[in-house]
Amino acid sequence: MHAFARLVARDVRLTLREGGAISTALGFYLVVVAILPLGLGPDLNLLSRIAPGVLWVSLLLAALLSVERIFHNDLEDGTLEVIALGPLPLELVAAAKSLAHWISIGIPLVIAAPILALLLNLPADAFWVLILTMLTGTPAISFLGAVGAALTLGLRRGGLLLALLVLPLYVPVLVFGVSAMNAVIVGPASFLSSYLILCALSLATVVLAPLAAAAALRLSLG
Amino acid sequence: MRLSVQDLTCVRGGRTVFEHLSFDAEPGKGVQLVGANGVGKSSLLRILAGFLPPAAGTFTLEGADEETPIGEFCHYVGHLNGVKRAFTVHENLAFWADFLGGGEVDEALDAFNLLDLRDIPAGLLSAGQARRLGLARLRLVERPLWLLDEPSVSLDEASRNILSATIEGHIAAGGLVIAATHLPLGVKFGQTLTLGAEGTS
């Protein structure tokens, strides 16, 4: 457990120190959300109706930008080889690095979401669902992203392939995240049923995705 | 501890790199791995470290716990240094000490003459200095089997002497060293393994 915590702490510190990944993700999120009303026109009703979907889709895209980094940098400078010889099984290495991605990229994006929601005229009573559903869904985004990152490791221009691989996997999280929010904003469906499925998706991903990511890492190290 | 390799075959990309390789590495006798480019020196080291599955054959570390992967008994120093550019020299080693379960960071830095650079970001190091930082792991964490792939690349003469002394110290203490190298290291290896056209000898 000690090595696991050290690895998470190292990755979070590296992301904070290098800085680029967080600001790119936040900047991208801001630009996508801000540019949409310009294209759609100033219809406030329309904007507030599509706000949950827009906020979720652009969050997925913003998170996707930095997913590649989860393993890529460590492979390039050789630290992944040394980590693989450590006491931690590769499954836990993958889990630690996914968790670090969630802490350093996922959480800042969730914090930014309510601010960006103001641009889209999200109804005031939906802000708490926005934060709650995103906090629940973003771990799945990081952990699924790690599988894609491990599969495309070592490929030239793996980033585009990564997006193709991972975005379809994000669909369930997107669907239930948005439907939980819509249940609160427009009703009449129950918030809880969508939200609990979202929780289940997230939990299952956190458990299963590291197994797949570790298998892919073994191939890349060979 | 003793490493025994039996009938190892390595296939990469459909091409047989070497086959039926058998040898024993005894404690107190380092193994020097020689051979032309592409005969599989690096592949052999990667197989022993557990990165690459062998196509056939087995290798065992006698005296080691069989449940534990062999990787956890070895140091692997490959072409890459395993150094994080954003961390300082000290932070780099401090992480490995924590993660791999090692000892005194400053001692390991001192052994490779890096103490003066302790708080410099590793991204600013020269190639030789970064190499020394990678090698300092050998001193930091005690592990019985050292797998070294061209360890002396980009080192100056003084640093190469430090490396030779470190390797000789490890061999004298009963450790196992398998080193692939083209440049003379100045280490007395007890055994030379030539990979080549014949396969093995």
Image: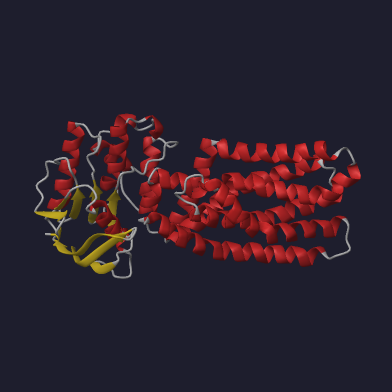
The vertical placement of A23 against A66, above or below, is above
| Residue occupying the point 51% across, 58% down | A95
Residue A189 seen in the figure: yes
| Depth check, front residue: A198 or B18 | B18
Please indicate whether residue A47 sits to the left or right of residue A74 in the image: right
Q: Residue A197: x percent and y percent?
A: 71, 66
- Counting the numbered discs, the total is 0
Q: Quadrant of the N terminus of chain B?
A: bottom left
Tell me where residue A198 sits by quadrant. bottom right
Q: Residue at x 36, y 42 (%)?
A: B93
Quadrant containing the C terminus of chain B in the rendered view: bottom left
What colour scheme governs how the chains and residues are painted in the rendered image of this protein?
secondary structure
Q: In which quadrant of the rendered view does residue B3 lie?
A: bottom left
User: Residue B191: horizontal and vertical position, in percent?
Assistant: 10, 55
Can residue B121 be seen in this snapshot?
no
Q: Which quadrant of the view contains residue B91?
A: top left
- Residue B19: x and y in percent read 21, 64
Q: Is residue B122 left or right of residue B131?
A: right
Image side of residue A199 versus residue A217, left or right = right
Measuring from the top left, give residue B29's x and y in whole percent: 11, 55
